[in-house]
Amino acid sequence: MADDKEQIKKEMAFILKLDAQIDYSQRETAAKYHKEIEGKGLLTTPIGRRYVKKLEQIASGDTSYDKCLFCNSQTQKDTVICPSCMARLKKPAMIYCRNCGGRMPASSESCPACGSPRGEGYKYCAHCGREVPMPDMEALAGKVKDKSKALAEQAVRLTRENVQDLSEKGARLAGNLVADAKAKKDPAGAKGGSKKRMILRILGILLALSVLGAIGWNRIFMALAFIALAAAIYMAVKKKPKKYIAIAFAAFLLLSCTAGLLDGNAATDNILDYLGTEESVVYKTYDKETFETLLPFSDTLVNRAAGANAGVPTIYLDSGSPRRVKEIIITKETDPSFHINGLHINDSMEQAEKCMKELNAVYNEAESRKRTAEISSLVGSGTVKTMVYDLNDHGRALSVAIDVEDGSIAAMTVCYPDE
């Protein structure tokens, strides 16, 4: 296994070197390199064979080489590796110590300056070396105290109101029970007693709705649908009048349809909400069999937005148990309904800056310059600019990269920062 990994690294370095040299628009050049590689048996790993296949397609006149060799997303002009994957392959040789802020080799297990293990500490950013601002604990404690006090007062008020409401309903229920008992003794009042029982049922339903309101309307309607179905089955077994069975069954259909609509309306296309989602939820949208290992990152699974999954974002699953979504990418080929807090593909750079300001995201100038330079070296022009922001989303530290081409957004990536 160790030998396989070393071979993959060697072939990846060789592919990067070839990608920078080969002019893919020239079929003769692609054919020449393809023949030489095949003749010498240079690329033998799965990723190497994929690159050889790509050269063969280009040499035969296939112009569809604008798809990334790794994630199948759109590439820039004369390359077969997209900017996102290129940035992954060209990780910086140096990082910053989180404890003291000093520079250290990315391969080192501990800081040579302070001796802290790599990744330990929280005072400095590992990527840019800037000091991480600490929250005002006194102000935070004050806010928590005020919020707790407000919640306690609200709980007392709601308890009093509910007790009073239940007392009134209990008194009415007792009166109705007495009247119902009298109606049973008096045959002439049997019809009136039936109406009262119906009123009691309605009051019971309303009381249940008020108690279960906090659970969620879709769950409430689904529970009521099952109750209606059970009532219909019970009345059918007991051979009750058919009209009551029909009413109960109709109520089941209506309630279940309402629950389905409410559950569907709860869906969101904001990709921030999907980051960190467990794999069991992911597989309800994506076919589990279409996930494959992202070489050379053997601990990562990727589902490319192609084939049966065309139009959905490209997602990466981490190596945890259970696996969770650690990165999401949307491009111009993704369904336009997906967005980041209302920011869509093809929106302007001004709209992107406004959206990030509303999210209180911090512009990462160092990462933005580095990624823009990497993309420009691939594209060969200065028309592409990447803006990288550090975002705190409900306690989660996230990184948002927005690729802008000719003034409009061409791609957006949301991920957890690399440790």
Image: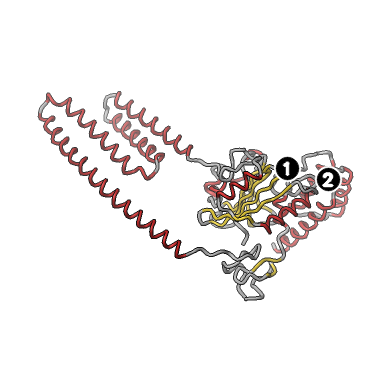
Q: Residues within 10 Å of mark 1 (few under 14, many from 20)?
A: few
Does residue 250 appear in this view? yes
Measured from the top left, where is residue 325 in percent x and y? Answer: 57, 51
| Residue name at image x 51 percent, y 63 percent | 135
| Residue name at image x 54 percent, y 52 percent | 276
Colouring chosen for the image of the structure: secondary structure
Measured from the top left, where is residue 44 in percent x and y? Answer: 78, 54
Does residue 290 appear in this view? no
Q: Residue 194, labelled with which disc? A: none
| Residue name at image x 39 percent, y 30 percent | 254
Measured from the top left, where is residue 145 in percent x and y? Answer: 38, 60
In the rendered view, tell whether residue 112 sits above or below residue 23. below
In the image shown, does 398 or 386 lie closer to the viewer?
A: 386
Q: Secondary structure at mark 2?
A: loop
Q: Write down the residue under mark 2.
A: 24
Q: Residues within 10 Å of mark 2 (few under 14, many from 20)?
A: many
Indicate the quadrant where residue 239 lies: top left
Q: How many marks?
A: 2
Give the amino acid at mark 2: Tyr
In the image shown, does 399 or 22 lie closer to the viewer?
A: 399
Give the amino acid at mark 1: Asp
Q: Is residue 249 left or right of residue 76?
A: left
Q: Quadrant of the C terminus?
A: bottom right
Q: Is residue 167 left or right of residue 94?
A: left
Measured from the top left, where is residue 219 in percent x and y? Answer: 40, 41
Q: Write down the residue under mark 1.
A: 406
In the image shown, does 360 or 312 lie closer to the viewer?
A: 360
In the image shown, does 395 or 182 lie closer to the viewer?
A: 395
Disc 1 versus disc 2: nearer the observer: 1
Nearer-N-terminus badge (1/2): 2
